[in-house]
């Protein structure tokens, strides 16, 4: 791991992660008549790819940093990833989570032994809450997306997928919050196109790519069912990597996301949470190109049971 | 393939199936504090292990048999397996299905190009419907469980799981309808214990093992949510293989099955249909022993959406 994430760092992360986690399946899928691939990161032990970045970042901490513990801010999947890696490495983890995070994510993070601090979204600035905590208690911040080690770790999914495919993918279609996974995938396979998919009003990476500068979410940004894809803004490191690789971004609606969740239920027999289905939603709705070398990232499966039940229930729509 | 299924036949089936289907994941799970494994056959292209037996049976048909088409009787997963294999091999398939089969299974079988003939369960004898069809139209019967090729094909899941585990499993815990998968697993790993799990009143293998003779389901057998596990009786070939290997059988209730479906939703982010969750239900409820060499078969994920929504919805229980 270096200060700036590198392709070699992603390769090293993939090697480290292969020692502790089985590869997630790369499943053949047919979308609107075209064969392509889906990477089932929802089948990770914590139900999301975030376990990759958390593991790689935490396993590279110095002994002194380990002793001081880690602090993370997350709506739930990064939280579980950091809590999982911290428990495995014997590190204390404090996680700042929004009070309106899905209960399943709060419960899972708690069950992994992390100390949870709640904040009100959007009233409070979560980075400020984390900075205050670190000023009070010490500890190392593990940023959810704007961190070299985290980006390299997430990118290991691209190395793994390319090995499973037996060649460099032509393109990755991925959901995008702050841009950690997208940046990692871009580094993993320098020749692959990257398509970032975001909810309307929360397309902070798409807007940043369009403007060539970081854009903050509007205070009155619309509600979205994609609880995992609501960053205040992307970070310079993510923009620097994605600039020239991922333009333009793609926006999906809540209805398109729900349709993708239903498709994954019926065709793949897998549970995908709303944010985790965004890339699939873009593919199914024809908003992004697909070919036989395309990999659609299914990034997480920690879905609130009641909301998921309403989404898949045929009598509801 | 021989007239009687053999261990070598299962090994050959596994080799043939490895050429056309990716291995399904063997996922680490922790059940009541004990680490063991879950074989995710719900992730097969048709959402169930039945694709294995259908492929092996159909790919061994003679040219003459292929030209005459195949006939199968199934509540839905064997139907999809036969339809899938038949389409791939260019064979006409006629499937006899109960009128009350889950719509998702009827729709999927139709989408795979099979000709469907409906019958009323339990008023009609499905084997008689199939025999009448064959007398009228010709064709080769592909029995869902009492068939050497089908048993060998299903057993390929055991060969695959043992390879993934890196050693012979100590035991397989499997749901059981007529006993095709259970017999195949028994042949795949002669040193492994086999635990068959069935719904109450439909434990036709458990009762046959206890009595040493085939037992027919009572005309007034109770309703079960496990639509895939309602055989009229097991067959001599299944009983012969399982006798002395699988005694005693285990019974699970609808509530235990639903709890297992919820557990798979939350812990594995996978959709498991009721019958496919029976083995997991037995493990979670402590009715079968578990150790680190135990493999729990998750056999299918073709769940009716409305019923599944009710099962996982937290507000419903």
Image (tube, coloured by chain):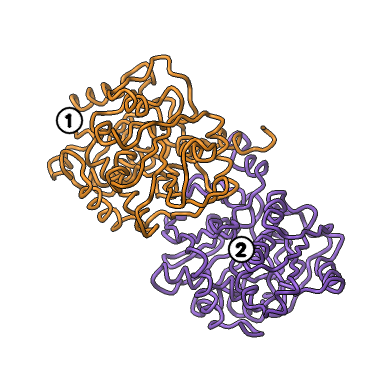
Chain colours: A orange, B purple
Q: Quadrant of residue A261?
A: top right
Q: Label 2 near label 1: C-beta < 8 Å?
A: no
> Residue A156's spot in the image, x, y percent?
30, 49
Q: Give the side of residue A208 with respect to residue A147, left or right.
A: right
Q: Quadrant of residue B279?
A: bottom right
Q: Determine if residue B114 is in view.
A: yes
> Residue B99's spot in the image, x, y percent?
80, 54
- Residue located at (46% from left, 52% from top): A292
Vertical relation: A149 (above or below) B8: above
Q: Please tell me whether mark 1 sits on a helix, a strand or a loop.
A: loop
The residue carrying mark 1 is A138
The residue carrying mark 2 is B175
Q: Determine if residue B32 is in view.
A: no
- Residue located at (47% from left, 45% from top): A290
- Residue located at (41% from left, 68% from top): B165
Circle 1 marks a residue in which chain? A
Q: B277 or B5, which lies in front?
A: B5
Vertical relation: B55 (above or below) A317: below
């Amino acid at each position: 791991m270096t200060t700036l994430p590198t392709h070699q760092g992603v390769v090293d992360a993939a090697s480290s992660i292969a020692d502790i986690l089985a590869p997630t399946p790369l499943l053949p899928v047919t979308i609107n008549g075209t064969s392509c691939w889906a990477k089932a990161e929802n089948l990770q032990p914590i139900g999301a790819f975030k376990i990759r970045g958390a593991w790689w970042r935490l396993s590279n901490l110095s002994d002194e940093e380990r002793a001081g513990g880690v602090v993370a801010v997350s709506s739930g999947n990064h939280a579980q990833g950091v809590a999982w890696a911290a428990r495995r490495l014997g590190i204390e983890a404090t996680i700042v989570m929004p009070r309106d995070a899905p209960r399943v994510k709060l419960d899972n993070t708690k069950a992994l032994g992390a100390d949870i601090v709640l904040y009100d979204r959007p009233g409070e600035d979560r980075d400020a809450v984390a900075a205050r905590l670190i000023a009070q208690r010490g500890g190392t911040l593990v940023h959810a997306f704007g961190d070299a080690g985290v980006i390299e770790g997430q990118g290991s999914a691209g190395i793994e997928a390319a090995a499973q495919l037996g060649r460099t993918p032509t393109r990755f279609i991925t959901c995008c919050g702050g841009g950690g996974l997208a940046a990692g995938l871009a580094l993993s396979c320098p020749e692959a196109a990257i398509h970032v998919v975001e909810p309307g009003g929360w397309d902070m990476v798409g807007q940043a790519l369009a403007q060539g500068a970081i854009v903050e979410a509007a205070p009155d940004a619309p509600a979205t069912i994609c609880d995992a894809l609501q960053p205040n803004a992307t970070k310079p490191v993510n923009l620097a990597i994605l600039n020239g690789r991922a333009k333009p971004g793609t926006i999906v609606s809540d209805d398109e996301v729900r349709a993708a969740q239903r498709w994954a239920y019926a065709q793949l027999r897998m549970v995908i949470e709303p944010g985790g289905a965004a890339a699939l939603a873009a593919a199914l709705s024809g908003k992004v190109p697909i070919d036989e070398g395309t990999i659609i990232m299914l990034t997480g499966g920690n879905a609130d049971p009641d909301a998921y039940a309403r989404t898949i229930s045929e009598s509801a729509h």
